[in-house]
Amino acid sequence: MPNFFYQLHFYLFGLIAIASALTFVTRKSPVAAALWLVNTMFALAALYVMLDAQFIGAIQVLVYAGAIMVVFLFVVMLLNLGHPDEIADIRGKWGRIAAGLLGLALLAQIMAMARSRAPASLIMQPVVPPEGARDLNAVSTVAAPLFTDNILAFELTSILLLVAIVGAVVVGKRRATA
């Protein structure tokens, strides 16, 4: 039974990630597309957590769904690409009915999981690390190669983001004065 719930959620979050990514690509409004990309990032973070990579899942939410999407939305708002009437993707009664049914299904699933007791196989047992890895944790495992071997790529990425923001400000000011 626990394996069934794990597989169900794994495929559910995978399907949500794929559907959100496809919806992101097909949106005309950049604001709506950015919000669908945030939904994709959250689904991917849930998949990382299910694969026992909690640190990567948290970084996925903080860096991509948080910081990068704020920069994207800042640029979109600065360039005035989105209009308020284009933000809502659910138009008509069928979209609202589908959203309501999906919400009820997720609520029923949460209620069923809350009522059932967690089997012993789902309760996390403490893991004793090997002798050589006692001083390493998830952050140092990721940070050591990032700031030693890959420091050039890390710095180039930060410079690229800075140039993109400066470029957006220049283009935005040029449109405002013209």
Image: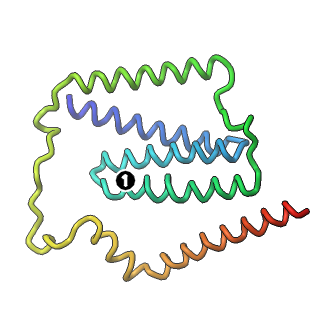
**Does residue 105 sit above or below 50 in this rendering?**
above
Q: Which residue lies furthest to the front in this view?
A: 177
Residue, x 67% and y 41% (percent of image)? Answer: 26
**Does residue 18 sit above or below 99 in this rendering?**
below
Q: In which quarter of the image is the N terminus?
A: top left
**Left/right of residue 127 with respect to residue 71 in the rendered view:** left
Q: Where is residue 133 in the image (x, y as percent from the top left)?
A: 15, 71
**Does residue 83 sit above or below 5 in this rendering?**
below
What residue is shown with label 1? 57
Nearest the eye: 108 or 53: 108
**Left/right of residue 114 with respect to residue 172 in the rendered view:** left
Residue, x 32% and y 48% (percent of image)? Answer: 49
Location of residue 109 by image quarter: top left
Which SS class for mark 1?
helix
Nearest the eye: 6 or 126: 126
Q: Position of residue 5 (x, y in %)?
A: 27, 31
Location of residue 131 by image quarter: bottom left
Which amino acid type corresponds to the residue marked 1 in the rendered image?
Gly
**Left/right of residue 106 with respect to residue 40 in the rendered view:** left
Q: Where is residue 146 in the image (x, y as percent from the top left)?
A: 39, 75
**Does residue 7 sit above or below 156 in this rendering?**
above
Q: Where is residue 33 in the image (x, y as percent from the top left)?
A: 64, 45
Residue, x 28% and y 22% (percent of image)? Answer: 112
Nearest the eye: 41 or 21: 41
Residue, x 52% and y 59% (percent of image)? Answer: 67
Q: Quadrant of the C terminus?
A: bottom right
